[in-house]
Image (spheres, rainbow, N blue to C red):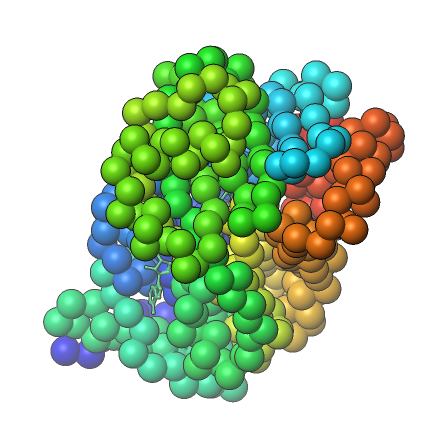
Amino acid sequence: MTDSLPQAAGSRPVLIVGGGLVGASLAIALDAAGIEAVMVEAAAPRIGDQPSYDERNLALARATVNGLTSIGVWKHAQAQATPIQHIHVTRAGEFGSVQMDAARHHVDALGWTLPARELGAALLRRLDECTRLRRLAPARVESMEPLVDGWRVRIRAGEETMEIDASLLVGADGTASSVRERLGIDVDRHDYKQTLFVCTITPERDHAHRAYERFADNGPIAVLPLASRRCGLVLTVPQHDAKAIEAMDDDAFVAFAQQRFGWRLGRLSRPGKRHPYAIQRVAARSLVSNRAVLVGNAAQTVHPIGAQGFNLGLRDALTLAELLAGAPDPGSDELLERYAARRAPDREGTMAMSHGLVQLACLQQPLLAPLRSMAMLAFDRIPPLQRLMARRGMGFRGEPPTAVLERLP
Ligand SMILES: Cc1cc2nc3c(=O)[nH]c(=O)nc-3n(C[C@H](O)[C@H](O)[C@H](O)COP(=O)(O)OP(=O)(O)OC[C@H]3O[C@@H](n4cnc5c(N)ncnc54)[C@H](O)[C@@H]3O)c2cc1C
């Protein structure tokens, strides 16, 4: 059966394809701004079905929490979040470290850790409060046909198919975005040939709200503070070692993690279930096309160790929502050009930082070691450099959307 949504001429909705962490945030922001939108999501709206509402622990930048607060999501998530008050960055076998303290930057927290599953639950609760938004899930785009002033999109939801004429099409459908492919937007890819293992762990000593990032020749490891004295472990290994790590029993895995991380938190124990992720960098060559725009991982997927993917994607979503609010024509070339220009410095800077961090911190050239140590000392000891790094780390980069600024230090 084919059904068409009733649409008054001139008031076509914005169609968001993908209701993951970024697509759902955008849908909520548009609803809050009184903008008609339809969100199409392939998975059923349940934790466990939605692929990115999983066990990964997200480090949320301060700007992100401001943004989530402004769109009414944080109130549903904050009880499960753990503040990060200190960050400690080191490299195995080299001197020098970078330490960042919230108090030194006059804030109560540099960021927060939150399991993606809990953020997903908060988004679903907030989505239920939306009054204008139409949600189609589970549903998929079957075809897209350009119109003079929009897109005619054919959607299958179970046995039903329907056509929606949209004024603007938003690709929020993740790294393997089919919207991006249908729009003919090319990507630059980089395979890190690394696998990331995520699990929880209990350290002997209290984490004291400290997040650790430790680099090594064979990949970085991060330990994030969680509730109930637990920590989130993010362990990167070369791809060719992944099978062996996956096959390890808990004792062998903990010994391996301990050897990579060291003894700053004392003995590690009680590892939770391990979840492996293959890591690649995928960057769309253009953010916009005719009456279409990409946000979140569909626009750029970065190495998770820099903890930037969702932080960056939320700034995509909130910038787009800000530009769309009150715009007479949501899909106009002028608006989309403004969006692309406004996102460029943040996007390029964050992508370069994430990629550069992994490349530089894992490269094995011995000549680099003293340079790296000097750089760490400089970032640790030179106040303007610390301030710059802290501001960027907290997600204040480029021309941020107004929604993330309320708590700007
Ligand atoms: C291990 C790990 C740790 C991470 N840690 C951090 C961190 O600490 N901080 C941080 O900021 N980021 C982190 N990230 C990155 C973050 O998870 C992603 O950037 C974020 O999930 C991107 O959200 P998204 O909505 O753009 O894409 P996704 O979350 O991938 O969502 C895409 C959605 O689109 C749907 N979809 C796909 N195709 C279709 C279709 N054809 N039709 C309809 N729907 C479709 C999917 O079902 C999915 O729900 C981490 C990532 C990983 C893998």
Depth check, front residue: 287 or 51: 51
Tell me the quadrant of ligand 1.
bottom left
**Residue at x-position 41% and y-position 36%:** 256
Find residue 4 and report its horizontal and vertical position in percent. 27, 75
Count of marks, rendered view: 0
The residue furthest front is: 366
Q: Is residue 406 above or below residue 103?
A: below
- The quadrant of the image that shows the N terminus is bottom left
Q: Which residue occupies the foreground of this view, 316 or 49?
A: 49
Give the left or right position of residue 397, taking residue 282 as reference: right
Question: On the image, which quarter does residue 97 sit in?
Answer: top right
Viewer can see residue 20 = no
Residue 290 occupies quadrant: bottom right
Image quadrant containing the C terminus: top right
Q: Position of residue 105 (x, y in %)?
A: 74, 23
Residue at (65, 36) in percent of width and height: 93
| Residue 211 drawn above or below residue 116 | above
Q: Which residue is drawn at the image coordinates 28% and 62% (left, top)?
A: 42
Residue 94 in view here: yes
x and y percentages locating residue 358 in the rendered image: 62, 52
Q: Is residue 245 above or below residue 84?
A: below
Residue 322: x and y, percent? 61, 51
Nearer to the camera, 283 or 242: 242
Residue at 51 percent across and 32 percent down: it is 261
